[in-house]
Structures are given as C-alpha cells and as structure tokens.
C-alpha cells in the first residue's frame, strides 16, 4: 500500500508590495514568487487550486477596488479586475466556481468565476466586511464585520428572489455579542451542523452552534486575537495574538465546572517577536503554521510545540497564509510544458470580474424563480421550470441564438436547487430520527433507574 503523503505548498502575502511567496512545505524550497501584491488580511486565496487571486489595498480615497489573478506558472499578474468599491476579504467555494468579496460599504459581492459575471450583491453589514468563509459543504456563507456582527447566509435564500422578497431578512443567524471589530472566523466540519468560532478586537473568541444559532462558549484572552485555526479533531483551536503568542484554547472542557473564561486557555506557543497575524493547519503533515508582522512564517509541531521549519517573506509583515495540495502546474517536470502551452494558446485564466450586475442576468433568474412561486409544491415547480426551459432552449438553438447556453446554465442551477432541497429534507429526517433514538435511550435509562 502506498502511504506517501500528497505534497503540499505554502503561500503567503503581505500588506506591503512584497509579492506572494510560495514554498514546498516538506522541503522548504521556494517555488515562483508572484509579483505585485499588497493584500489585506483574508484577501489572498487559491481559486479551486487553478490560480491565485488577491484583493489589493487601495488608497483610502479611492472609489474602486482591485482584484488580481496569477496563474501558477507565471510570476506576473495576468488578469486585473476593478470592482465597484474596494474589496478586503475574498473567498471561493471548494470547486472554485464562485468568488465572493466583502466591501468597505458592508456589501457582499458574488461572482461566477468562469464568466466573471456579478450574480448577486447585497447589503450584509452596517460597516466594512472583514472576513468571509464558506462552511465545509459550501451551503452557507459566514461573514464578519467592523460593526462586530457575525452573520450566516444560506445560498439557496440568496439566489431565490421570491424568498428574498418574502423574508424579513436574508441571513439565517445574526450574532451580535462581539463589541468590537471581528478579525477572523473559522468553521468546523459538518456543514449546517458545524460549530463556528469568531475572533474580535474585544479580546474574545466565541464558539457558536450553526444548527441551533446560539453561543456555546465565550473565551477571554490576554491580548487581541487577529487569527484563529482549528485542529482537525476539533479538540482545541489556536489563536494568534498581538502579544506575539499563539494561545491554545480547549473546546472539550466542561463549561459548568469552569468559573473563569481564562481556564479554557490551556497553553501557548511563543517565538514571534511581533503580532501573530495569520494561522493555518496542515492536516496532511499535522503541523501548525503561523505568520507574523515580523515577516516570518513558522511551522510548528503541535505535539512537541517545537519549530520544525521557518520561511521568511521577502518584504514586510505577513498577513495571509494558506496550505494547499501542490498543483500539477508547480511540478518542476511539467512547468516548462505548461509555460509553453500557455504561450501557444494565450491567456488561460478566466475573464475579469464584472463591476455591475447585468440586467439581463437578473431577468433570466427572476423569470425562473417567479415561475416556481406560482406552484404549490417546490419540487413540482422545479420540474415545470425545467420543462419550460427545455422548450425555450430548443427554440433558441433552432434560431442559432447564443442565449441557449445561458438557458442551459439556468437549467443546471434549477437541477442543483432541487437536489439541495432533497438533501435538506433527508438531513431533517435524519436529525428527527437521531433525536427520537436519543429520547428512547434516555427514557429506557430512566425506567431502569426507577426499577
């Protein structure tokens, strides 16, 4: 049996134009350094492992923002996008089909990567969006803001115009317990049943239940926390502080016996000379990575608390770190082939992101959703919508219209929505069955105790 671990890389960026560093996690060898990047915190991402994207720090007086793309095989910026306003946090779903950005105004922007179309834009917070993260199953988007709030957005609601009109608010949960700016958010495993942890400048980290929409735990730290990451088993989480320490907080301790919030903090790692600004965890190599304002990236063994490797960013403080499976494009044996192919076939990256929503896109989506709204059964509505769209596609194809492709995309979206609805019903059935079994076991135990 082949037990060789899949190779991983580390990418990191800075708020100063020092480019994007890229290293082999196991050997420490630096790959290409990608030029011309000055990113805000949470502004650097890998889009489906196909290419790199980063929002850019702008002059405070600038009215528009910038998002840049790099292919893995070239150090230069290849695509420049100019959104309606400056964007800070960026996040992509696991497949890299959608890109989401948080604006200074509190708006969230939702783009389709392949076409660059802006599909949705909505007012999410009263002040600037500071962090964005998808749940593991990509069904929920979680956002944090300078106004101290953490909000959970179901994507099915966001893309259903009818439900949007009927609902009093778009979010599923709005957590308001933080008193200052939210600095980071992480989600656990389990999709809609996962926990989420938020960090804030109020020196607290709060643990929330997504399924119940309640606060599970509040942990107070001796320093402001700018970054957090979970260990794979979700027994502890790591919190990077402005005191230069990485605090270790327990998730499994019994809160009923803990009289002080401080007792949840069970240890710390200390080596950085300045604030710890970003954290990442490699489940493959079982190592913790930390980036700091001192420009260093340290790789830790979480069991021994020893430093096993150090990377130095070329310039300035480090404010973003990610650990990724190494793309094929970075394989030294394939790099020259990929570069030659790129030169022959031209730009291989997606087009720039649109600045505004296309009104024709809104009409197509609205027509489909309105048709659903006229039916009593949501599943029947999806079937009827699909039949109507099929007829329209055939007519358009006969006319040789390019709009046929657009309608085909909408049909696929409807099929996806129907599948998600079915999945939610099965999930609800499973939860009800699980609750019934637990109740039966508890009642059985009580009967035996009484006897």
Image (cartoon, helix red, strand yellow):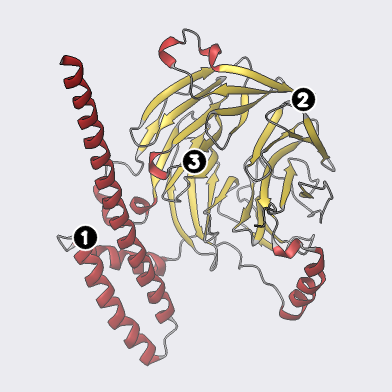
| Residue drawn at 19 percent across, 20 percent down | 448
Image coordinates of residue 217 in percent, x first then y, are 45, 22
The residue tagged 2 is: 274
Closer mark to the observer between disc 3 and disc 1: 1
| Secondary structure of the residue carrying numbered label 1 | helix
Q: Nearer the viewer, residue 81 or 224?
A: 224
The residue tagged 3 is: 106
Distance from disc 3 to disc 1, alpha carbons, whole Å, reads: 32 Å
Crowd around label 1: few <14 · some 14–19 · many ≥20 (10 Å):
some
Compared across the picture, whether 295 is left or right of 195 comes to: right
Q: Nearer the viewer, residue 315 or 146?
A: 315
| Residue drawn at 35 percent across, 53 percent down | 156
Crowd around label 2: few <14 · some 14–19 · many ≥20 (10 Å):
some
Label located before the other in sequence (3 or 1) = 3
Distance from disc 2 to disc 1, alpha carbons, whole Å, reads: 55 Å
In the rendered image, the vertical position of residue 350 relative to residue 316, given as above or below: below
In the rendered image, the vertical position of residue 386 relative to residue 242, given as above or below: below
| Residue drawn at 48 percent across, 19 percent down | 253
Asked whether residue 57 is in view, the answer is: no
Q: Quadrant of the N terminus?
A: bottom right
Image coordinates of residue 307 in percent, x first then y, are 78, 31
Closer mark to the observer between disc 3 and disc 2: 2
Q: Quadrant of the C terminus?
A: top left
Asked whether residue 422 is in view, the answer is: yes
The residue tagged 1 is: 378
Image coordinates of residue 321 in percent, x first then y, are 69, 42
| Secondary structure of the residue carrying numbered label 2 | loop
């Amino acid at each position: 049996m082949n037990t060789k671990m899949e190779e991983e890389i580390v990418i990191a960026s800075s708020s100063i134009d020092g480019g994007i560093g890229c290293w082999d996690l196991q050997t420490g060898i630096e790959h290409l350094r990608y030029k011309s990047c000055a990113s805000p915190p949470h502004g650097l991402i890998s889009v489906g492992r196909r290419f790199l994207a980063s929002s850019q720090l702008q002059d405070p007086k600038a009215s528009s923002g910038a998002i840049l793309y790099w292919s893995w095989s070239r150090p230069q910026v290849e695509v420049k996008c100019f959104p309606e306003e400056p964007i800070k946090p960026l996040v992509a779903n696991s497949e890299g089909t959608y890109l989401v950005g948080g604006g200074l105004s509190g708006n969230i922007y939702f783009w389709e990567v392949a076409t660059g179309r802006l599909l949705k834009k909505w007012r999410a917070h009263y002040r600037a969006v500071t962090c964005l993260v998808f749940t593991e199953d990509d069904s929920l988007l979680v956002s944090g803001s300078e106004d101290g709030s953490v909000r959970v957005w179901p994507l099915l609601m966001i893309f259903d115009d009818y439900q949007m009109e009927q609902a009093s608010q778009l979010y599923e949960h709005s957590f308001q317990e933080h008193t200052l700016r939210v600095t980071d958010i992480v989600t656990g495993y389990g999709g809609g049943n996962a926990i989420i942890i938020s960090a804030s400048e109020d020196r607290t980290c709060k643990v929330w239940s997504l399924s119940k929409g309640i606060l599970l735990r509040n942990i107070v730290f001796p320093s402001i926390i700018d970054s957090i990451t979970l260990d794979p088993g979700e027994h502890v989480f790591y919190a990077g502080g402005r005191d230069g320490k990485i605090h270790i907080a327990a998730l499994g301790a019994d809160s009923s016996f803990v009289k002080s919030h401080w007792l949840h903090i069970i240890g710390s790692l200390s080596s950085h000379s300045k604030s710890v600004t970003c954290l990442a965890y490699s489940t493959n190599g079982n190592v913790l990575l930390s980036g700091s304002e001192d420009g260093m990236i340290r790789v830790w063994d979480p069991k021994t608390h020893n430093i096993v490797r150090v990377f130095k960013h070329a310039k300035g403080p480090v404010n973003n770190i990610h650990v990724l499976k190494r793309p094929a494009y970075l394989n030294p044996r394939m790099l020259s082939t990929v570069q030659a192919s790129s030169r022959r076939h031209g730009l291989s990256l997606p087009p720039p992101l649109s600045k505004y929503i296309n009104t024709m896109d809104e009409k197509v989506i609205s027509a489909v959703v309105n048709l659903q709204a006229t039916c009593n059964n949501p599943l029947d509505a999806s079937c009827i919508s699909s039949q109507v769209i099929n007829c329209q596609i055939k007519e358009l194809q006969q006319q040789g219209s390019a709009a046929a492709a657009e309608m085909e995309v909408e049909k696929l979206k409807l099929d996806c929505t129907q599948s998600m609805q079915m999945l939610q019903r099965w999930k609800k059935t499973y939860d009800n069955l699980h609750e019934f079994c637990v109740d039966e076991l508890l009642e059985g135990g009580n009967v035996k105790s009484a006897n």
